[in-house]
Image (cartoon, grey):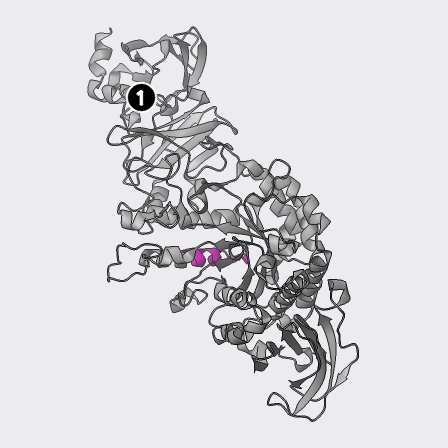
Amino acid sequence: MNKKLYNLMDWAEIEAVTYSEEDHPKKLLGPHSAGRSGTIIQAFFPEAKSVSVKADKVKEPYPMEMMDESGYFAVLLRKKIPFHYVYEVETKDGKKITVEDPYAYPQVIHERNSKKFRNGILRYAWETLGSHIVTVEGQEGVHFAVWAPDAMRVSVVGDFNDWDGRVYEMEKLPDESGIFEIFIPGLKAGTLYKYEIKAGNGTVVLKTDPYGFFAEDSDDPASIVTDLASFNWTDEDWMAERHMHQGSESPMVIYELKTDAFDEKKQGFKAMAEELSRYLKDNGYTHVELMPVMEHKASGAAGYHTYGFYSPAAKYGKPDELFHLIDHMHKEGIGVILDWSPAHFDSRNGGLARFDGSPIYESPDPRRSFHPDEGTLTFDFSRPEVRNFLLSNALFWTRIYHADGLRVDNTASMLYLDYGRNDFLPNIYGGKENLEAVELLQNITNEVHKEKSGVIMIAEDNSAWPGMTTDTAEGGLGFDFKWNESWRDDFLSYLSYDPFYRTDHYGELCFSLVYAYAERFMLPFTHDAFTDGSFLSKMPGNSEEKYSNLKASLGFLFTYPGKKVIDASLALGDEEAWSPERKLNWELLKKNENKEVHSLIKDLSLLYRERPALHELSLEEAGFEWINCISANENILVFMRKTKKEKDTLIVVVNFENIPRKNYKIGVPMPGKFKEIFNTDAEKYGGFDFRNSHVLKSSEDECDGRENSIRIKVPPLSVIVFEVQ
């Protein structure tokens, strides 16, 4: 053994490398100045028989000496750094390979970015962490970076190193960010990889990349190096005008599509594009809400992101195929809202749980981390790096995938520390509010809106948390819209009773107007209301009455103040219960099992979009006025929808009794003529066509506290709309 070389070796550190316990491998590996002696190059190839250094512009390679039988090699060269070289390796089984030295390259992550990440203000963290195809000092390869602050050692493993964690140990940044990085020259898009992490207690685990852009379709997937910059977007016109399609005065009819309900063997993102956009346009929808497109696995009672917060679900296609789906939707004038779940993640070993051997994404206190209702882990919202992970994730889907909005799932479980927990850890003031989650949601909505791109944020919240859609400057959470689940639940509860008994529950039908303008609401006829059966299965009466209830309910939905969200199963209008086992397909959708229901939704959507009174002031009290909300015995409601122009006024009559009224008197806001323009009992919708076929002239006959009135036909279980002429 070369004595001079031997004396230059740091044997204690070499042991850390050979035992795979080194978090600063660059202290030894790669080229280092040996002063006047030249340059010492050290390498660790545990499966190598021999290794040589082949320097540029030098004909013969320099043989390296095996300093430790574990595979630790070194050589002392008379050359001074910098100079480029490669390793020529002969493996124990006789293979000869050429390897670039990843430890010969400088740190890639700039200190300012790691500092921002440490403080939770790195807005586009996915640009720094994860895997990226980059060029460093003229060499193209892949840069890997991962946050693992408590790890003893992190290695990137894949086919390129036979999944051997002893090779390509990552360098921990010299600051306190807890980020490990390595640049491996020569790797390309499509490379499979994972992070092998040795925890402080010596336990070794394999983890999928939290910031990975794509992963295998597997229960234990490897991440895949992916270039997201290659897609050619063509939706410039939509993006420029997006704010006009989803503002407070814009009509929005959202089709809620549970992606898992589709047979992924036949339909993926790419196949969905043309079929889905055609179906949505034909049926009058303005938006589709996909839930979810992110890579997720089932856990507990529901599905939560496990391995891929930054990755689309591989079973439906690659990132480019999701790009294509959204791009095509935009070209067809359809907005795309993504279901997003920043509250929970799976507790299995391959994902975020105890990522580096300790709870870094979840709280160390089980009273905060484990969610007994869901069987999942909740994020530690107090940790800046975790807040950064989630904030960046929201911006990632809106910036990179051009999502038009995010529907934030289960915000109540984020906001309340006692949500689903009997034993909970109070906040610093002894309360049950999760103050860190409040701050995070405010930051997310602020940062999304700061982009000024017209993206909307929607809260799915079943609590009474105040100010969900109030501006953050006024102490609110800053969402654009909130699902009005209380309205939906009260309405469905009312409908579930036989019409004879609905009289006693009439208040449930009217109560929501007490708080209708406290938030900017969306009206969700959505999947979570039908997990135990279809809409029709919840309705009383025979088949004909069930369908009449459905048609009247849709009429009420479209004429009531608020944006509209309709679940795919409800839109089918059939008897089957919504269930994960039921696989939808385009043939089923095109078949339109109940053509009358499809026709009704299409026409209601057209009415809603074309009549300003139904959408322009739907979020303001000035856009609604009761005419009659006291006819409990008849189960009838009468109200006006208005704009600033009196001529736009519409009168809506709702009958949830299965009795027709032939000469029913209602008050009208002004003297004049009134024409029926819509009736859910029309023959084309499968009704009896019990309609007001002639224009009705008001008379000076007091009714409903108004000087003028008209007498109308009111079909059973129906909604009719009149315009002022």
Front residue of 150/668: it is 668
Front residue of 699/427: it is 699
Magenta part of the chain: 443-455
Q: Is residue 453 magenta?
A: yes
Q: Main secondary structure of the magenta part?
A: helix
In the figure, 46 relative to 308: above or below?
above
Front residue of 45/209: it is 209
Place residue 147 in its image quadrant: top left
The residue positioned 48% from the left and 25% from the top of the image is: 187
- Residue bearing mark 1: 29
The image position of residue 127, as x and y in percent, is 45, 41
Seen in the image, is 430 located left or right of residue 353?
A: left
Q: Is residue 283 visible?
A: yes
Seen in the image, is 14 located left or right of residue 305?
A: left
Q: Is residue 123 visible?
A: no
- Please, what secondary structure does the residue beneath circle 1 have? loop
